[in-house]
Image: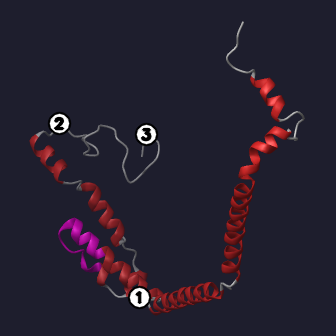
Amino acid sequence: MNRKYVDPRLAAKTWRPKSGSMSPGLKRARAPFLVRNTLTGVLLGAFAVGVYTYSIRAVRQDDFADIDDETNAQREKERLAQLEKMRRESATVLTVGEEKDVMERAAKAVAREINGASLDTSVDETSSSRASQPQSSPVLTAVATQRSRRGVLVGLLDKTLPGALDPTKKTLVWGAPDVDNIGRVSSRN
């Protein structure tokens, strides 16, 4: 059998008879490229060393002192803003009497909005007469009024379809728990 090609294993043994060594034929084949390959290797190595050296020097000359200044300035701004906020909050602190008056006025406004009318004048009495006789709180009065009047849909359905609503609570869902008393569905109040 005639073979056209040389066995690759035999050809490899002619160029590198031992591992890591070169045959005289391989040395002759590489000789014309020795200077060019050496010069290319030196240039690539010099470029890598130059980039590394430049990077290290550029980082070393920056002392990062400006970052500390920026951080300190930001902290100072935050501290001043917090002090200003505390100053504003301390100016709006109410005494117990002032807070009671504000809460009573708010309760009256809520009750007026719910009822469409003002609360009775008993809330406007002086604090000494209030302490002597027990009265219902304006907030409780507003909540009781709100429970009796549930909204526009309930009013319309009660007039047009009186049997559609639960007769005890005036809700669409019969036996539904009160939304102000969140608990179990089976709980009865």
Q: Earlier in the sequence, mark 2 or mark 3?
A: 2
Instruction: Give me the residue at 69% from left, 20% from top.
Output: 5
Image spot of residue 84 (x, y percent): 49, 91
**Could you tell me the amino acid type at mark 3?**
Val
The secondary element bearing badge 1 is classed as helix
- What is the image's colouring? secondary structure
> What amino acid is labelled 1 in the image?
Glu
Instruction: Give the quadrant of residue 133.
Output: bottom left
Q: Which residue is mark 1?
A: 98
**Secondary element at image label 3:** loop
Q: Which residue is mark 3?
A: 185
Disc 2 + disc 1, Cβ < 8 Å: no
Mark 2 vs mark 1: give the one in front: 1
Q: Find the distance from the CA under tag 2 to the CA under tag 3.
A: 23 Å
Decide: few, some or many residues near mark 1? Use Cα within 10 Å; few <14, some 14-19, many ≥20: few
In depth, the one of 71 and 188 nearer the eye is: 71
User: Residue at 71% of width from left, 67% of height from top?
Assistant: 46
Q: Amino acid at mark 2?
A: Gly
Query: Looking at the image, is 167 positioned above or below residue 100?
Result: above
Q: Position of residue 170 (x, y in %)?
A: 24, 45
Quarter of the image for the N terminus: give it.
Answer: top right
Determine crowd level at label 3: few under 14, some 14-19, many 20+ residues with C-alpha closer than 10 A.
Answer: few
Main SS, magenta region, reads: helix
Q: Mark 2: which secondary structure?
A: loop
**Residue at point 29%, 46% (across, down):** 169
Q: Check disc 2 and report the residue beneath it.
A: 163
Looking at the image, residue 152 sits to the left or right of residue 176; the answer is left
165 left or right of 187 in image:
left
Q: Are marks 3 and 1 in contact (CB under 8 Å)?
A: no
Write the start and end of the magenta stretch as one range: 108-122
Tell me which corner region of the image, top left, top right, bottom left or bottom right, holds residue 129: bottom left
Task: Report how far apart the C-alphas of labels 2 and 1 lie in the structure.
Answer: 49 Å
